[in-house]
Amino acid sequence: MKIKVKVAQKQQVSKKIDTDFIRLDAFLKMCDAVQTGGHAKIVIQEGEVRVNGEVCTQRGKKLRSGDNAEFENVVYSVE
């Protein structure tokens, strides 16, 4: 018996920043991925966020242009 699995395409969202870098928790808030900074802190510390393909638990992680953050099957790109 064969089982077919459909993998959903990840949604892509790009956000432009006007500074050299932005903290991961602030970026998630800016993208409306989370509702509050407290919510961002929880999802980051629980390992639910990937930065450039790797799990990141540092909410102060600096994201620069070209970096990606992934949360709940959506990829947020920093421009």
Image: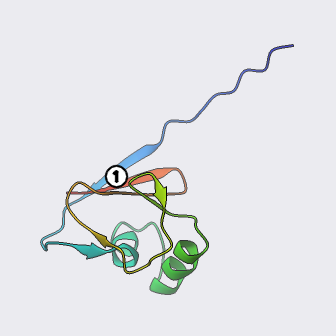
Question: Which residue is farthest bottom?
Answer: 38
Left or right of 26? Residue 48 is right
Q: By what rule are the colours in the image chosen? A: rainbow
Describe the element under mark 1 as helix, strand or loop. strand
- Position of the C terminus, as image quadrant, is bottom left
Residue at x 14% of width, y 72% of height = 20
Q: Quadrant of residue 70?
A: bottom left
Residue at x 29% of width, y 57% of height = 67
Residue 75 in the image: state x and y as whole percent: 41, 51
Residue corresponding to mark 1 = 13
Label count reads 1
- How crowded pointer 1 is (Cα within 10 Å; few <14, some 14-19, many 20+) is rated as some
Taking depth in this image into account, of 59 and 18 the one nearest to the observer is 59
Residue 61 in the image: state x and y as whole percent: 36, 74
Residue at x 35% of width, y 78% of height = 26
Q: Which amino acid does the dot numbered 1 rest on?
A: Val
- Position of the N terminus, as image quadrant, is top right
Residue at x 56% of width, y 77% of height = 45
Placement of 33 over or under 79, stated as above or below: below
Residue 49 in the image: state x and y as whole percent: 51, 63
